Image (cartoon, rainbow, N blue to C red):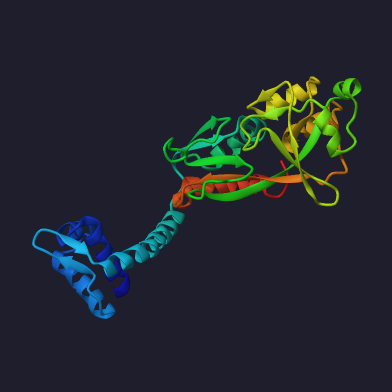
Amino acid sequence: MDRYREMEAFSAVVDQGGFTDAARKLGLSKSTVSKHVFNLEERLGARLLNRTTRRVNPTEVGIAYYERIRHALNVAAEAEAHVTSALAEPAGTLRVSVASDFGLTHLSPIVGRFLSRYPEVALNMEFENRHVEIASERYDVAIRIGEIKDPALHAREICQTRLRLVASPDYLEKHGHPQRIDDLTAHKLLRQSNNATPNVWTLTTPSGEQRLVYTAGPLTINDGQALLNAAIEGLGIAYLPCFLHEEALQAGQLVDLLPDLPPDLMAIRAVYLPGRVAEPKVRAFIDFLVEEFGSSEP
């Protein structure tokens, strides 16, 4: 515990630029903070601070030490916050961003159960067909489908969905039924503009080889549900997750084009800023989604 207090005191002095402001931040006396830093320097056998009458600055060794202990102090603070929040009831406004196709078909029908379980939470759910900036736009959670490229975000997988090539019987009657991946280049391929690579599909052959298909067609849309409707209307071939096309397949509105291809799996994740999962409302919502979707494919 003394070592933690020493590191905390030293870090506060560097952050605040002096012992007086560090003591005020920590709620300690100036002499106590000074003693902690003195003991730390004695134990390490190194001078960590240059002290002048006007300012306290870290030495070169002190800067290196500060940079290494900040992560440890942040982890410790997050752990304490997690334990403390675990005892609190979820409450407050929860802002959630979700793609409209998944939100309308699968999230909207279950939010009533979440709100009944946690009556002190007010849910503000935004349907967005773009990747929102979680921090600057002040979202608590975003539901993302596919790859997470921002290393600053934390993510928890909720479930996985399968991608399949589908087209309507009317389209296939007019344009023919592709028998292999290479045949797709002669067809109208519908594109989803908010995908990371809207002009390219990555397909897996029965042997496990990945093939890139460059799409070209009459229509590009930024919404999965609208793309599904376009495929049903016979405007072209779509590459869609099963949570969108499954009912249309069962109803005969669409056909699974290349059923011998291994289904490509795509993760659906809850994404949040580091430390936010310690908040009861955020943790409760993510746990709820895993409970609802984790045992089956949506």
Quadrant of the drawing holding the C terminus: top right
Quadrant of the drawing holding the N terminus: bottom left
Q: Is any atom of residue 144 visible in this view?
A: yes
x and y percentages locating residue 165 in the rendered image: 80, 35
x and y percentages locating residue 205 in the rendered image: 83, 46
Tell which of 168 and 247 is nearer to you.
Answer: 168
Q: Residue at x 67, y 47 (%)?
A: 159
Instruction: Reply above or below: 190 against 120.
Output: above
Farthest residue to the left: give it.
53
Left or right, 9 with respect to 145, comes to left
Choose top left, top right, bottom left or bottom right for residue 10: bottom left
Left or right, 282 with respect to 5, comes to right
Instruction: Reply above or below: 251 against 279.
Output: above
Tell which of 8 and 180 is nearer to you.
Answer: 180
x and y percentages locating residue 75 in the rendered image: 41, 61
Q: Residue at x 88, y 23 (%)?
A: 175
Left or right, 79 with respect to 117, comes to left
x and y percentages locating residue 4 in the rendered image: 32, 70
- The mark total stands at 0
Choose top left, top right, bottom left or bottom right for residue 73: bottom left
Q: Is any atom of residue 257 visible in this view?
A: no
Left or right, 193 with respect to 216, comes to left
Choose top left, top right, bottom left or bottom right for residue 8: bottom left
Q: Residue at x 70, y 36 (%)?
A: 200
